[in-house]
Every structure is written in structure tokens, then in C-alpha cells.
Image (tube, rainbow, N blue to C red):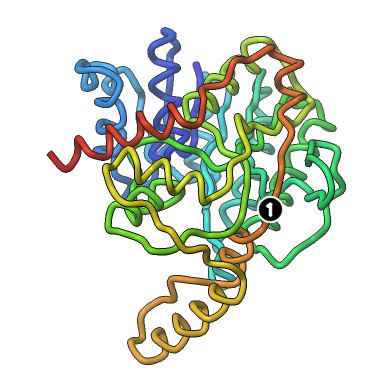
Amino acid sequence: MILVTGGTGLVGCHLLYLLVKNNKQVSALHRKNSNLEKVKKVFSSYSRNFQEIFEKINWIEGDINDLESLNIAFKNIEEIYHCAAFISFDKNDLESMKKINIEGTANMVNVALDYKIKKFCYVSTIAAIGLSTNKFTDEETEWVDNSNPYSQTKKNAEMEVWRGIAEGLNATIVNPGVIIGSGFWRRGSGAFFTQISRGMNYYPSGKTGFICVKDVVQIMYDLMEKNIFSERFILVAENWSFKDFFRRVSLYLNLNPPKKEAGKTLMTLALILDFINSLISGKKRKLNSSSIESSISTSHYSNTKILSKLNYDFIKIDKSIEETCKVFKSRLD
């Protein structure tokens, strides 16, 4: 039996579908107020028999910060895919991210050791990889602490997994880039599709690594099936500029692409205006320095390690964008 955390998130949803289609017995941990209908919608993008596939999953109400519910969820479990996380670039969310990303992962590792779990896969992020300014960044690039609260907590969460490995846990870590996939249009890359669909004049000036969600979950599955442990892998299909990404999304949504670059000066001005608007309206800020820094920085990530380990054939980013746009448009029909 396999247990998946974060099953109502982007990676978790697509992973659950893959596992069930591969005839795996699956349990999924979900919080009390989580939206299981989101999972069905993701499944429906794959198959008309989505309800039947959904019903094959054993849904367990619980929380990675609740040891009692974890002890219930871990019964008869042999493999773990830990996908649950709190994603935010807002420093005001730091304590929540520490609680979920670090403490929650520590709980998962500790209980996995107690129950002698055979296999453990942790979903981290390229935000927890060090950055190189003059060459491709890989798994060995030196980590330099930064002001990004999300990357800090995910890096520390990885350290909990490495601790578990040192104590005998068969675990592997994946560090995906920007994940392109359907089902979640208000956060992650899905928010880009929503924003672009409403019309945009500007695009961020940065560049980073992108990957299709189908590749992420397939590689996770392959690593576990091949018993590849005690390693971390950058999962990036291609490095794209945000300019090219926004243009391709616009193309497949039949919209005019943004034509003006939003560099550091313009983004800083937008940050100031957003701050003023927040003070006047009392609403939560939409922008913060960490998210802006990520959108204007240029990073090149190497996928050499995972290619050499699995000889994997990535889905082209252009194809992933096209497929995701088709699903996005279908929800508007």
C-alpha cells in the first residue's frame, strides 16, 4: 500500500492518477476542509472514467502535523510520496511554512522510520537548490541562504529527509522547476494562465527551468520503482525565459502576447504601489520582494543527472503549454 500526502495539490493529484492507473493500492491523506472535487476535475482531464478511478483511492482525513492521524494513516503502508507543502513567497507566512514544510516533513520522516517504511519520495523544489551565476546550476551547486522564505523552509525540510536517510530511511528527493499542468488556476504556474487569459501588457524579465507535471510524477514513480535512493534530482525539461513562456501561452489562448518587459525598476515600482494599495484597502498584498526577485532573475538548471540515471525523455515545454491551454479553455466552454 502507498500513502500520498498533498493529494489535493497539483503534483499529488496527477500522481494519484498515475498510481491508480498502474494498479497500485493507494491511500491519500487530506485535511478536513480540502476540496476533493479538485482531484476529480484533474482526473477528468485524463479519462471519462474519472469517478471510478477516484473511488479506488482510500481517502484518510488527517494532517502531517497531527501525529495521531499519521499513525492511523501509516498502518499497512510500505511506500510514501510526500507532496504536501505550504507554498508562499510572503514573509508573513513564514511561521506557517515552518510548521508545514519543516515540522510536517520531520513528522513524516520520524513516523516513516518508526513504521519501517520501505520507500520514501520527497517533493522539494529548485528554490532549494543553490544558484550559479555563470554556469548551469546542478545538484552540487553550493547553497547560499537567501531572503526567500519558501526556499528556506524547503531547504530545511530536505535536511529532515537527509537525517532520515542517515538513520536508515530509503528516500529520494526531487527538485522540480516551474511545474506546468492543469487543475489549479489560482496558484503556481496555473495562475500565469489565468492572468494571461485576462490580458497582460508586461512580462517578467527572468528565466528559469520548466517541466510538465506528467514528467514530475512519472520520474518520481520511476525512481521509486527502480529503488534509487539517497540522492536528489533536479527535474527540469527546458530552461525558458518568462517572455517566451508568456508568448506561447498567449498564442495557444488565441490572445495577443504581452510586448513590454517588466525589469527590476518597473517591478520595484509595482511593489511600492501594491504596498500603498494594501494600506488603503486593507487587503493582503499581491506582490512581495521574494516573488519579484524570482521573476526577474536568470537561472539555468541542468537535468544531466536525472537523464543519466533514467535515460528519460521529457515532454517538450511547448507541448505541455499547448495541452494545459486546451484544458484551461475547456473549463470556459
In x, y percent, where is residue 289?
60, 72
Give me the residue at 43% from left, 26% from top.
Answer: 319
Q: Would residue 152 be seen by someone viewing this image from the given angle?
A: yes
Query: Can you name the residue that lies furthest to the left here?
Result: 333
Give me the residue at 60% from left, 76% from top.
Answer: 265
In x, y percent, where is residue 84?
51, 42
Q: Would residue 75 be seen by someone viewing this image from the given angle?
A: no
Give me the residue at 48% from left, 33% from top.
Answer: 72
**Position of the C terminus by quadrant:** top left
In the picture, measured across the screen, residue 228 lies left or right of residue 235, that is right
The amino acid type of the residue labelled 1 equals: Thr
Q: Secondary structure at mark 1?
A: loop
* Count of all numbered marks drawn on residues in the image: 1
- In the picture of the structure, the residue carrying the numbered disc 1 is 298
In x, y percent, where is residue 24?
45, 11
In the picture, measured across the screen, residue 305 lies left or right of residue 276, that is right
Nearer to us in this view, 252 or 83 = 252
Give me the residue at 25% from left, 17% from top.
Answer: 47
In the picture, measured across the screen, residue 317 lies left or right of residue 232, that is left
Does 266 appear above or below 204?
below
In x, y percent, where is residue 191?
38, 52
Q: Residues within 10 Å of mark 1 (few under 14, many from 20)?
A: some
Does 172 appear above or below 269?
above
Which image quadrant for residue 160? Answer: top right
In the picture, measured across the screen, residue 254 lies left or right of residue 31, that is left
